[in-house]
């Protein structure tokens, strides 16, 4: 092939415009025009031509720049790997560069599968033992890999969604979902467009294989070694060009609001003889000659000399005359049929009188000729999508409760969590993967619903509603928080049963979720206020109406010491609803509302117990680790630091600088339970010298459930428990935090009885303020209020009434890690201290 007769040469500033007018800018819809392989020749810095063209095309025209000046590999297999790697970079570059919205994304379905298979380089398998089993497994793996990459949290949410769907779908639909992917795979390998293309193309003789898995078997077993390497390289180029051609084809079912305005450009730097670039150009030339399939790829290379060839045209070929000789050259299978050289003049010298020419970036016109014809269909599709989106939004926001989601306004989806007030049909357990914990949560909620039904049928007793408001979904769906919630739900059901069987009150429990860490507690609190307002009876003497919709008199639980809990207390108290908290312990909570009470200890009393335990151990230094600046951790750490007689160092990180590795020191964990695992691991990795492990202690937010699932065998840990030393046993059929929930309902029940004592049946209307008044009356009892977690004495040492129990029973327990199948696991807890109840005191307590 000879150079183009260009006279003084084509200026670089004009070259892209000429190419753009003919091949880059516009495309005919009916047929993809033939695209040449243009070789720009210039002795002075030819690589700069590629840079100029790349800048000129900008982000409008999809293009990629490849350096193809490397020497070709000596082996046939090495040459195939070089071509594959070049085309890999080209495919990725064109896919990522094609970001302009009017053009769309280029897809390489055939080439991606081919490159993925060729990279396997597996040894041939024994077909008599397991014919094509490896190939089928790889193809299924490839189909799965086409799905978008997701984070671990997204995968967990999807798994939870499938599990929830499996619970709610009919069995035949669930069974159909299990067989869908195998059926899709079977269709894909036989009728899929990509698989059919591989079996119909001409390279590597696909008809010699029985089916596509058989052909793929040849591709994964290093075909460049066992088959014709030139055929493998041509198949790579053919797949690459076929994908580009498919992206630009117009089909009836492919709605193109704006037709394609430009074609992709492959820019080759250092295109010369004895290079891998020459091999690539010859392959593109041969594949186009042999297949006859048009493709939209425009190839432009730069170099100092044209590629040598074995034949010469009868007349010089230029860009203007190239089309006239193309068909004849293709029929003759010329290795330069698509190759055109263009000599480019050197850059003119830069002078003050004649500044250099600025190339600028290209622009593309839009064509709207077909847009108006599609407007009616587009409007119909938009209406359908809009209506579906509105319905889906409502269905999702209300947790998919029914076909008419607008009716479930008290339960909605927020940040992936179902929050709000649940009815009798909903269960807060769908995201829990631990089967035992999920079953426990379900059973506890079903027990509450059963007690609600029994209470509604009970006559002759005061009917009332208590809202259990807590965090029923967590950051970790299987966390210790939900184990404690399950215990509290069990305690609620037992308290309902006790009240009804002893003819004291018919109690209905309504469950409300404030979200993980009570993040949505303020919004849910307002819904509770509205729910309570709707439950006010029109006729207090109508016993049937009261039994069906008893008034809301109190809110119990409150989920822990969180910022959201503070806002919820203000909202509930400001609207006249009394509150009885279970595990919240921050010292400032009682000051937020006069209607707030709690049955658990305060952080200040917990800090006294912790300080006394440190003294009992004889430890001379303690490090309090508070990793989070939340209400609970910050308050507890400050209370411990204020205790006299102990040296305390506060830290939000565990490191060699903050932890003293000695048995004479103690590290106290004042954080949340979900951070305990990383805390324990860090301490163990910091103190690695034998005998240097400090004493480890944890606050009340951790529970034995966490330790049973996290502590290594033989690891000893002390921790604070609010439910007293009876946590290892049972009281009235409840354990752990269930005792606090039982006592919270018990306090409300006793307040109801005190309020109604001596009153006529219709004399006092039950509401939040009436229950608050009853609790105030109970607080005056000299012996306090009876409770299974320890007496509730709401009198201060000076006799003044307060909203938190004075010196509430609290324990320090020691648990030792055991194996899951160890028989001693159930009794691996030792009571070190039990303070607050002088009748059952264990160990030395604060004075």
Image: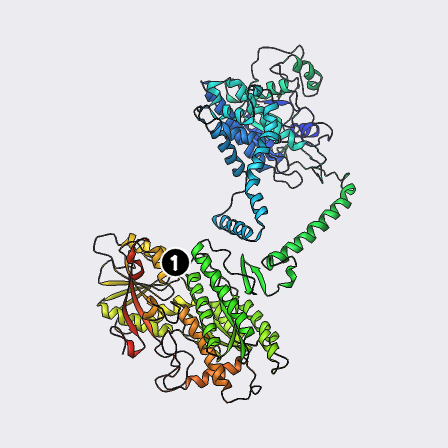
Q: Is residue 628 above or below residue 249?
A: below
Quarter location, residue 399: bottom right
Q: Nearer the viewer, residue 265 or 841?
A: 841
Q: Position of residue 604 (x, y in %)?
A: 35, 74
Whether residue 536 appears in this view of the structure is no
Q: In the image, 688: left or right of 166?
A: left
Identify the residue under disc 1.
Answer: 675
Q: Is residue 515 above or below residue 43?
A: below
Q: Position of residue 658 (x, y in %)?
A: 30, 59
Q: Nearer the viewer, residue 831 or 596?
A: 831
Q: In the image, 42: left or right of 836?
A: right
Q: Is residue 24 above or below residue 174?
A: above
Q: Nearer the viewer, residue 200 or 759?
A: 759
Q: Is residue 316 above or below residue 844?
A: above
Q: In the rendered image, which quarter contains the C terminus?
A: bottom left
Quarter location, residue 533: bottom right
Q: In the rendered image, which quarter contains the N terminus?
A: top right
Which residue lies at the image location 73% right of the left edge and 30% below the top edge? 28
Q: In the image, 563: left or right of 260?
A: left
Q: Residues within 10 Å of mark 1 (few under 14, many from 20)?
A: few
- SS class, disc 1: helix
Whether residue 99 appears in this view of the structure is yes
Q: Position of residue 381 (x, y in %)?
A: 72, 47
Q: Position of residue 135 (x, y in %)?
A: 49, 29
């Amino acid at each position: 092939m000879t150079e183009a007769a260009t006279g003084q040469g084509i200026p670089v500033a004009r070259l892209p415009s000429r190419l753009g007018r003919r091949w880059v800018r516009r495309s005919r819809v009916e047929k993809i025009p033939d695209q040449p392989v243009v070789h720009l020749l210039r002795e002075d810095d030819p690589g700069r031509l590629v840079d100029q063209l790349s800048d000129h095309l900008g982000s409008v025209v999809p293009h990629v720049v490849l350096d193809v000046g490397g020497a070709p590999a000596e082996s046939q297999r090495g040459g195939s790997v070089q071509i594959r790697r070049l085309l890999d970079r080209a495919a990725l570059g064109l896919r990522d560069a094609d970001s302009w919205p009017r053009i769309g994304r280029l897809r390489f379905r055939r080439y991606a599968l081919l490159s993925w298979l060729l990279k396997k380089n597996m040894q041939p398998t024994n077909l008599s033992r397991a014919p094509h089993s490896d190939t089928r497994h790889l193809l299924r793996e490839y189909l799965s890999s086409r799905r978008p990459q997701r984070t671990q949290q997204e995968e967990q949410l999807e798994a939870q969604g499938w599990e929830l769907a499996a619970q709610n779908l009919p069995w035949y639909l669930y069974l159909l979902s299990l067989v869908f992917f195998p059926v899709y795979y079977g269709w894909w390998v036989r009728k899929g467009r990509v698989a059919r293309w591989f079996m119909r193309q001409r390279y590597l003789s696909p008809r010699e294989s029985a089916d596509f898995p058989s052909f793929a078997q040849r591709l994964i077993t290093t075909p460049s070694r066992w088959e014709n390497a030139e055929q493998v390289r041509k198949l790579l180029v053919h797949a690459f060009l076929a994908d580009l051609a498919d992206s630009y084809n117009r089909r009836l079912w492919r709605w193109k609001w704006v037709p394609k305005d430009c074609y992709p450009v492959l820019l080759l730097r250092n295109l010369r003889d004895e290079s891998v670039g020459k091999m690539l150009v010859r392959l593109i030339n041969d594949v186009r000659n042999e297949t006859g399939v048009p493709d939209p790829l425009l190839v432009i290379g730069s170099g100092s000399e044209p590629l040598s060839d074995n034949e010469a045209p009868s007349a010089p070929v230029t860009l203007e005359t190239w089309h006239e000789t193309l068909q004849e050259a293709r029929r003759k299978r010329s290795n330069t049929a698509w190759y055109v050289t263009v000599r480019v003049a050197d850059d003119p010298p830069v002078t003050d009188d004649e500044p250099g020419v600025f190339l600028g970036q290209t622009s593309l016109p839009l064509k709207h000729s077909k847009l108006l014809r599609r407007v009616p269909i587009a409007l119909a599709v938009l209406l359908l999508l809009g209506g579906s989106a509105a319905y889906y939004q409502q269905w999702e926001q209300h947790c998919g409760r029914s076909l008419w989601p607008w009716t479930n306004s008290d339960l909605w989806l927020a940040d992936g969590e179902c929050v709000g007030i649940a009815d009798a049909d909903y269960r807060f357990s769908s995201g829990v993967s631990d089967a035992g914990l999920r079953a426990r949560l379900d059973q506890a909620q079903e027990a509450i619903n059963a007690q609600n039904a029994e209470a509604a049928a009970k006559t002759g007793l005061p009917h009332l509603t208590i809202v259990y408001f807590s965090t029923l979904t967590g950051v970790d769906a299987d966390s210790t928080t939900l184990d404690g919630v399950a215990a509290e739900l069990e305690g609620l059901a037992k308290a309902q049963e006790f009240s009804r069987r002893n003819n004291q009150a018919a109690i209905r429990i309504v469950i409300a979720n404030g979200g993980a860490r009570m993040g949505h507690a303020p919004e849910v609190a307002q819904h509770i206020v509205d729910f309570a307002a709707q439950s006010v009876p029109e006729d207090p003497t109508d016993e049937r109406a009261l039994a069906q919709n008893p008034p809301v008199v109190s809110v119990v639980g409150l989920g822990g010491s969180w910022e959201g809990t503070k806002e919820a207390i203000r909202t509930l108290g400001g609207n006249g609803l009394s509150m009885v908290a279970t595990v919240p312990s921050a010292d400032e909570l009682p000051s937020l509302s006069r209607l707030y009470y709690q049955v658990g200890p305060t952080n200040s009393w917990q800090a006294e117990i912790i300080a006394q335990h440190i003294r009992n151990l004889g430890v001379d230094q303690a490090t309090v680790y508070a990793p989070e600046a939340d209400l609970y951790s910050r308050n507890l750490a400050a209370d411990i630091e204020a205790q006299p007689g102990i040296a305390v160092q506060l830290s939000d990180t565990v490191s060699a600088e903050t932890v003293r590795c000695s048995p004479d020191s103690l590290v106290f964990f004042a954080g949340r339970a979900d951070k305990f695992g990383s805390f324990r691991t860090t301490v163990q990795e910091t103190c690695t010298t034998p005998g240097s492990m400090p004493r480890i202690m944890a606050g009340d937010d951790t529970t034995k459930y966490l330790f049973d699932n996290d502590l290594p065998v033989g690891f000893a840990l002390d921790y604070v428990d609010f439910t007293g030393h009876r946590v290892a046993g049972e009281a009235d059929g409840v354990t752990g935090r269930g005792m606090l929930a039982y006592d919270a309902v018990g306090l409300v029940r006793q307040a109801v009885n005190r309020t109604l004592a001596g009153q006529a049946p219709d004399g006092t209307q039950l509401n939040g303020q009436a229950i608050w008044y009853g609790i105030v009356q109970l607080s005056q009892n000299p012996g306090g209020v009876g409770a299974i977690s320890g007496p509730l004495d709401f009198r201060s040492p000076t006799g003044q009434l307060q909203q938190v129990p004075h010196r509430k029973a609290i324990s320090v327990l020691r648990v030792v890690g055991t194996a899951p199948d160890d028989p001693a696991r159930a009794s691996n807890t030792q009571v070190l201290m039990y303070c607050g109840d002088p009748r059952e005191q264990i160990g030395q307590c604060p004075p």
